[in-house]
Image (cartoon, grey):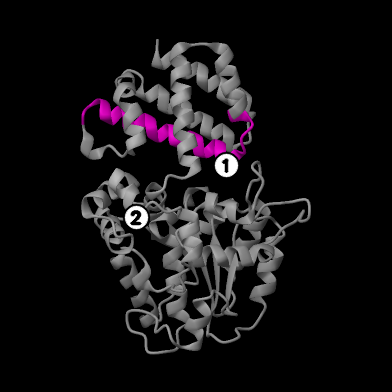
């Protein structure tokens, strides 16, 4: 990992901003060759479902695949296995300004925008995707300049915007395409209106829903989509991309790919640890030490800090804790091949992993998952984290 950091000692965000990509081709999507071929075949045969659900981690390329699929659909040039890249439609897609392409995505409210819709953030959205189509909600919140406590949702007002766009005639392509990123973030009223549209689809209109947590989408919408499961990337695919694109030596690339767990976005973040990943690990270590020492005054101060974080950061921290509990449990059994930790995490794990064992792994998992579920439901952060720390105390050191 030290070698990887030395070879790639650049700031991740500044690197991406300075080297914008203008490509949304299948060949630029990492891995997923079978899915690419299936998508191409469906277009070549003319058997296209009006609503398709790309379900999987966006770090594995679900949004990138949806964009490449759209460019191939719009392309009017000489295309076989991929878009031509030179026709007017391709040139517009490469800047994400094709008039028949529409986007819907979660947005945040602000003092100036009480009822925001996607169009009000379209410039920030295009810029982010042109930097890197492998994004997550954390990246998008940062691009919007959202406040720490802001929650991104697809609000009811978006349904009117969707209807307005669908009533427009196609400008240049045979199809209108609407990409809905993270439809699980859609308010119930908006979901119900989208359902009516899917039940009675507009002619030559294609909906591409890109979801990370498809189980959170209402069942009536799920039943009206053709689901395409996007699995995690293989370790080999990530390794080859790191070697070719980031110029890592193979040994370092393999180590990064192993810990990335099938996500290109995680691999990028590992090359230069993000502030959030460092913060999450520091707070996890602090939490475990405080719970072991059972000193309630420092625990209370720690809880106050966590309770002051925004919801997305609280969720990110809890997901990190859940992963660390799992990894330390596996490491305690000496199965290094399936341990996915960075060097920073392994350093702490060396002494901590013996305290996560078959006697407490299930209750620890249950408590962290319960806390995560309560945070999603907008529970009181101070109560949730206080209760969690007490339960960790009881299980880490009976």
User: Bounds of the magenta span?
Assistant: 306-334
Q: Quadrant of the N terminus?
A: top left
Please identify, in this view, whether the residue under mark 1 or under mark 2 is nearer the observer. Answer: 1
Can residue 121 be seen by looking at this rendering?
yes
The residue under the point 31% across, 24% down is 353
Q: Indicate yes or no whether the magenta region holds residue 328.
A: yes
Work out whether mark 1 precedes mark 2 in sequence or the reverse, and give the earlier one. 2
- Please say if 344 is above or below 24: above
Dot 1 falls on a residue whose secondary structure is: helix
The image quarter containing residue 101 is bottom right
- Residue 190, position in %: x, y? 66, 57
Q: In front here: 284 or 102?
A: 284
Q: Quadrant of the C terminus?
A: top left
Specify whether residue 223 is in view.
Answer: no
Residue 75: x, y in percent?
A: 45, 84
- Secondary element at tag 2: loop
Q: Position of residue 273 (x, y in %)?
A: 42, 44
Q: Nearer the viewer, residue 293 or 89?
A: 293
Indicate whether 127 appears above or below 343: below
Residue of label 1: 312
Residue 314 counted in the magenta span: yes
The one of 344 and 107 positioned closer to us in this rendering: 344
Dots 1, 2 in contact, CB < 8 A: no
Q: Which mark is residue 231?
A: 2
| Residue 290 placement, left or right of 200 | left
Position of 178 compared to 150: left or right? left
Q: Main secondary structure of the magenta part?
A: helix
């Amino acid at each position: 990992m030290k070698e990887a950091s030395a070879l790639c000692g650049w700031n991740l965000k500044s690197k991406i901003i300075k080297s914008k990509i203008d490509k949304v081709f299948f060949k630029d999507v990492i891995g997923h060759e079978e899915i690419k071929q299936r998508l191409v075949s469906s277009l070549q045969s003319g058997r296209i479902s009006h609503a398709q659900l790309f379900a999987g981690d966006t770090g594995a390329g679900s949004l990138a695949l949806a964009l490449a699929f759209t460019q191939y659909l719009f392309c009017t040039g000489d295309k076989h296995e991929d878009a031509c890249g030179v026709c007017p439609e391709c040139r517009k897609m490469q800047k994400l300004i094709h008039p028949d392409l529409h986007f819907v995505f979660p947005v945040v409210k602000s003092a100036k925008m009480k009822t925001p819709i996607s169009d009000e953030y379209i410039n920030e959205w295009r810029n982010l995707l042109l930097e890197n189509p492998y994004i997550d909600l954390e990246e998008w919140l940062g691009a919007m300049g959202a406040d720490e406590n802001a929650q991104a949702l697809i609000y009811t007002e978006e349904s009117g915007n969707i209807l307005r766009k669908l009533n427009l005639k196609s400008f240049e392509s045979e199809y209108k395409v609407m990409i809905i990123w993270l439809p699980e973030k859609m308010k119930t009223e908006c979901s119900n209106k989208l359902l009516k549209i899917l039940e009675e689809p507009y002619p030559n209109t294609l909906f591409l829903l890109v979801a990370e947590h498809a189980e959170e989408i209402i069942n009536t919408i799920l039943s009206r989509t053709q689901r395409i499961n996007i699995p995690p990337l293989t370790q080999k695919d990530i390794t080859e991309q790191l070697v070719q694109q980031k110029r890592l030596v193979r040994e370092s690339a393999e180590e990064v790919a192993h810990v990335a767990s099938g996500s290109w976005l995680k691999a990028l973040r590992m090359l230069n640890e993000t502030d959030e990943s460092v913060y999450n690990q520091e707070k996890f270590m602090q939490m475990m030490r405080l719970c072991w020492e059972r000193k309630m005054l420092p625990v209370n101060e720690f809880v106050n800090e966590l309770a002051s974080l925004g919801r997305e950061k609280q969720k990110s921290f809890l997901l990190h804790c859940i992963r660390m509990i799992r990894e330390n449990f596996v490491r305690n059994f000496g199965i290094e091949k399936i341990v996915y930790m960075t060097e920073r995490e392994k350093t702490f794990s060396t002494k901590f992993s013996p305290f996560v064992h078959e006697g407490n792994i299930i209750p620890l998992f249950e408590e962290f998952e319960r806390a995560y579920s309560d945070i999603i439901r907008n529970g009181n952060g101070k109560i949730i984290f206080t209760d969690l720390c007490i339960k960790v105390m009881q299980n880490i050191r009976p």
